[in-house]
């Protein structure tokens, strides 16, 4: 007997419109309910989701002109959405939301999401995207979906959360921070930060993420270095970064990125450090900085808690965070698809093999 293949969804993928607001809000709510048959990336963010519905209610600066938002529509009903953030200074695209709800004839949630991902990839080919990034929970067919679309699984992150109840540490004085070797990061630290990143990051991950020294010079709301699964939170945060200087060597031993939430989201910490360095003081400083900055703005310092992603190869940072009151809430998978082909070109220099990046045709 011939086995029939599942019917391909008959709806259409189109750019989202402002008139889709109500439908997108309902879709986001349904995808949070497992009983409704919805599927999402499943990032464990406490409080309101980093969703399209909240984006439309934020100032216009939150949704930037170079971002992309597509929906799947069938029988005049929106049943899926995908949102992509495009970095202004790199040709990197990040899928930060992918939702779909089953229930339409011949259109399962997985089929709808696959069509939305394919739409993003086609747009990326037309607009010269170099890399596509996504982070997702390994559930609901997420990882399988992206691997079928040509993504490579290259890492995992533990997501740790410090709840809102316990009081944050007291802010540090400038004198205490300087005595501990902690100071604000500056653009001139770019080379040292790149060296710190290279010292703690496996070579295959460095190649895939493709950071360069100019990427470490840029600081502010567009700064996604170092990358993490929860970097979209930084769009809704005031960002500061600090470094930990080595007491006996001309190098940096640690780095901390602090994002104080402006919206109903948890605050953000991203810590990077050499394995042989105790980063407990740097983490305590970061939590104290959050307390100081939220106190100045009139918000409760502990209203939303603090969330911190840690790569699995960055241990023992996770243990230092746990000692500061954090607890693991989830593990997410990091995937990437490159549109560049790396070609080794021999050149006439000693030991000369130079790596070139050539754009692959569609």
Image (tube, rainbow, N blue to C red):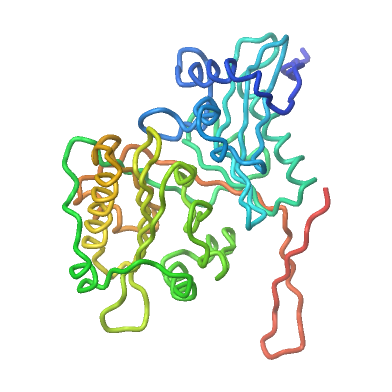
Q: Point out residue 226 in the picture as x, y percentages from the top left corner.
A: 47, 58
40 to 360, vertically: above or below: above
Q: Point out residue 303 in the picture as x, y percentages from the top left corner.
A: 26, 35
99 to 361, vertically: above or below: above
Q: In this orientation, which residue lies closer to the viewer: 326 or 285?
A: 285
Q: Point out residue 7 in the picture as x, y percentages from the top left corner.
A: 74, 16
User: For the view shown, which residue lies furthest in the right direction?
Assistant: 361
Q: Point out residue 9 in the picture as x, y percentages from the top left corner.
A: 73, 18
Question: Where is the N terminus found, in terms of image quarters?
Answer: top right
Please report the residue visible at 72 percent of the width from the left and 14 percent of the height from the top: 74
Is residue 35 left or right of 207 when viewed as pictured? left
Is residue 124 left or right of 109 when viewed as pictured? right
The part of the image, by quadrant, that contains residue 145 is top right
Tell me how many marks there are: 0
161 to 349, vertically: above or below: above
Is residue 338 left or right of 123 when viewed as pictured? left
The part of the image, by quadrant, that contains residue 289 is bottom left
User: For the view shown, which residue lies furthest in the bottom direction?
Assistant: 350
Please report the residue visible at 46 percent of the width from the left and 21 percent of the height from the top: 32
Q: In this orientation, which residue lies closer to the viewer: 21 or 73?
A: 21
Q: In this orientation, which residue lies closer to the viewer: 48 or 322?
A: 48
Please report the residue visible at 53 percent of the width from the left and 19 percent of the height from the top: 25
The part of the image, by quadrant, that contains residue 360 is bottom right
Q: In this orientation, which residue lies closer to the viewer: 154 or 209?
A: 209
């Amino acid at each position: 007997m011939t086995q029939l293949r599942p019917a391909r969804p008959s709806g259409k993928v189109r750019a989202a419109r402002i008139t889709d607001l109500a439908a997108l809000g309902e879709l986001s709510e349904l995808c949070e309910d497992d009983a409704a048959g919805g599927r999402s990336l499943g990032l464990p963010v406490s409080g309101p989701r980093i969703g399209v519905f909240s984006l439309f209610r934020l100032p216009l600066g939150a949704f930037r002109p170079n971002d992309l938002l597509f929906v799947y529509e069938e029988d005049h009903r929106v049943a899926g959405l995908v949102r992509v953030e495009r970095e202004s200074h790199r040709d990197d695209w990040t899928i930060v939301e992918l939702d779909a709800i089953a229930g339409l004839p011949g259109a399962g949630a997985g089929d709808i999401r696959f069509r939305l991902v394919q739409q993003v990839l086609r747009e990326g080919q037309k607009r010269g995207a170099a890399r596509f990034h996504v982070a997702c929970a390994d559930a609901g067919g997420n990882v399988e979906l992206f691997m079928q679309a040509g993504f490579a699984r290259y890492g995992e992150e533990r997501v740790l959360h410090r709840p809102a109840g316990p009081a944050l540490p007291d802010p540090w004085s400038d004198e205490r921070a300087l005595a501990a070797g902690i100071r604000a990061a500056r653009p001139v630290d770019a080379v040292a930060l790149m060296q710190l990143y290279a010292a703690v990051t496996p070579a295959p991950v460095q190649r895939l993420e493709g950071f360069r020294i100019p990427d470490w010079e840029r600081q502010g709301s567009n700064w996604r270095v170092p990358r993490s699964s929860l970097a979209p939170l930084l769009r809704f945060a005031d960002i500061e970064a600090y470094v930990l200087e080595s007491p006996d060597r001309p190098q940096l031993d640690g780095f901390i990125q602090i994002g104080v939430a402006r919206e109903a989201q948890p605050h953000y910490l991203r810590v990077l450090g050499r394995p042989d360095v105790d980063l407990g003081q740097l983490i305590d400083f970061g939590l104290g900085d959050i307390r100081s900055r939220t106190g100045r703005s009139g918000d409760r310092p502990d209203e939303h808690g603090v969330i911190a992603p840690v790569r699995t190869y960055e241990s023992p940072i996770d243990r230092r965070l746990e000692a500061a009151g954090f607890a693991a809430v989830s593990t997410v998978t990091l995937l990437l698809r490159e549109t560049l082909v790396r070609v080794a070109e021999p050149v006439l220099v000693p030991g000369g093999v130079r790596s070139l990046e050539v754009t692959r045709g569609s």
